[in-house]
């Protein structure tokens, strides 16, 4: 990548000095976290209890309101900081092939498919559970969730859930939030049994992606088909505000900035990201990235946001500090990079090639495509697992 400095290399890896030493000793390569690094850092990322986590979120929210720079909602997502819950899981990439009704499982060390199995009709995303112990395949036209045991990489018996296009979890872990896109509904369910507790009709069409405020009390969701954002009070189960994006907009993925002050929202129709104030729930500005801006992924050092531009066949690297793109990684000959995730060590960005039946692997240090792996038809929301973090907020891997 042009202009890459040694400082940028260290930031892209997101690895603290002690982890770098371990990597040098064990000779780990191709995006896999060394076992020694996992052992050394696991105790630092032990899952917090809901009470402890609530106090921590409240403190972060107060700091964010005062504009203090030390707030970082992704501070537990650093390279190698795996929870003890996932430390023994094999490193794998799970690819839901929407048009094939299957899941392809890839070994990230060899880039080979090691398992392939059928699930329900039109699997959209593979979602880690809040407690990190299960992966859920969202079969939205099949009206089921297929569990995968990440210790073995094998599927279990499906659970009946209506229209599970996407799946999130409340930050306190008490509620599963099913994005019933087809039904224009947000369903509040038990996070383990998925028994329905409450359904909320959305004042918009096509609800599908979201993220949460620092204090965990409000969920900002995107409504693709009507061009709206909706701020939802999770405790009172009501809409706080509906935001109409300007012109013809198709909002997609949503990510909170590390300092908790701004939501970044990908817009597939506009070809860029909206910056939305996380306190006022008001649009601040629009930043162009590329045609079909779709998925958003935070780097392991919390400095950059990777934006997959599905129409442009590229990935834009947005600086959180500068609030604008600082680099672009292009797929030679074009492509359709969609949803995915960052490897545990931060060195690889894995994205599904939605309209090309492949998975793309980008080197985040050199800023270029290094692998194209054929999978099934219509690959969509793939999950790289395990990843650092104490608990999952859902989607293809949003961790805190």
Image (tube, rainbow, N blue to C red):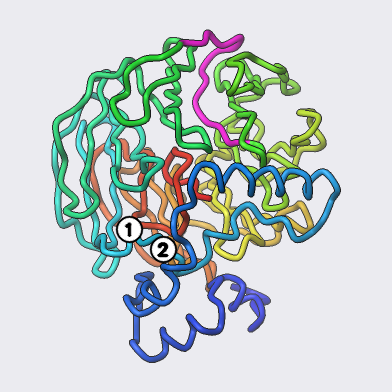
Quadrant location of the N terminus? bottom right
Image check: 371 left or right of 55?
A: left
Percent x, y of residue 181? 45, 18
Which residue is pictured at 44% across the width and 54% down the height? Answer: 47
Query: Compared to 153, does 37 lie above or below?
Result: below
Percent x, y of residue 51? 55, 42
Q: Main secondary structure of the magenta part?
A: strand
Q: Which mark is residue 391?
A: none
Residue for badge 2: 82
Image check: 341 left or right of 123?
A: right
Q: Residue 242 is drawn in which quadrant?
A: top right
Toward the right, the furthest residue is 66
- Distance from disc 2 to disc 1, alpha carbons, whole Å, reads 7 Å
* SS under mark 1: loop
Which residue is pictured at 28% across the width and 48% down the height? Answer: 94
Query: Compared to 180, does 9 lie above or below?
Result: below
Percent x, y of residue 249? 65, 24
Q: Residue 147 is drawn in which quadrant?
A: top left
Q: Residue 167 is drawn in which quadrant?
A: top left
Residue 333 seen in render: no
Residue for badge 1: 86
């Amino acid at each position: 990548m042009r202009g890459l400095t040694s400082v940028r290399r260290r930031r892209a890896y997101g690895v603290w000095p002690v982890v770098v030493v371990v990597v040098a000793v064990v000779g780990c390569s191709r995006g896999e976290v060394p076992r020694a690094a996992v052992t050394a850092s696991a105790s630092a990322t032990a899952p917090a209890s809901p009470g402890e986590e609530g106090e921590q979120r409240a403190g972060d929210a107060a700091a964010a309101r005062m504009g203090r720079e030390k707030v970082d909602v992704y501070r537990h997502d650093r390279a190698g900081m795996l929870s003890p819950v996932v430390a023994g899981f094999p490193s794998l990439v799970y690819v839901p092939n929407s048009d094939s009704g299957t899941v392809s499982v890839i070994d990230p060390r060899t880039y080979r498919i090691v398992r392939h199995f059928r699930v329900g009709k039109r699997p959209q995303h593979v979602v880690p559970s809040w407690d990190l112990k299960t992966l859920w395949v969202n079969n939205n036209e099949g009206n089921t969730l297929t569990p995968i045991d990440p210790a073995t990489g094998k599927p279990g018996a499906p659970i009946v859930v209506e229209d599970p296009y996407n799946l999130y979890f409340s930050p306190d872990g008490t509620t599963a939030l099913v994005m019933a896109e087809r039904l224009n509904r947000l369903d509040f369910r038990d996070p383990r049994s998925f028994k329905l507790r409450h359904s909320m009709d959305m004042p918009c069409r096509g609800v599908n992606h979201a993220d949460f405020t620092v204090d965990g009390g409000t969920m900002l969701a995107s409504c693709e088909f009507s061009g709206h954002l909706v701020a939802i009070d999770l405790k009172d189960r009501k809409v706080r505000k509906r935001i109409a994006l300007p012109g013809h907009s198709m909002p997609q993925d949503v990510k909170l900035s590390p300092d908790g002050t701004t939501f970044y929202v990908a817009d597939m129709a506009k070809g860029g990201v909206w910056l939305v104030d996380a306190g006022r729930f008001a649009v601040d500005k629009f930043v162009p990235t590329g045609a079909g801006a779709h998925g958003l992924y935070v780097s392991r050092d919390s400095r950059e946001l990777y934006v997959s531009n599905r129409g442009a066949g590229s990935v834009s690297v947005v600086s959180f500090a500068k609030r604008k793109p600082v680099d672009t990684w292009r797929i030679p000959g074009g492509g359709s990079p969609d949803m995915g995730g960052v490897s545990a060590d931060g060195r690889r960005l894995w994205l599904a090639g939605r309209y090309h039946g492949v998975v793309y692997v980008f080197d985040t240090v050199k800023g270029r495509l290094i692998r194209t792996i054929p999978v099934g038809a219509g690959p969509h929301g793939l999950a790289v697992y395990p990843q650092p973090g104490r608990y999952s907020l859902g989607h293809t891997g949003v961790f805190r």
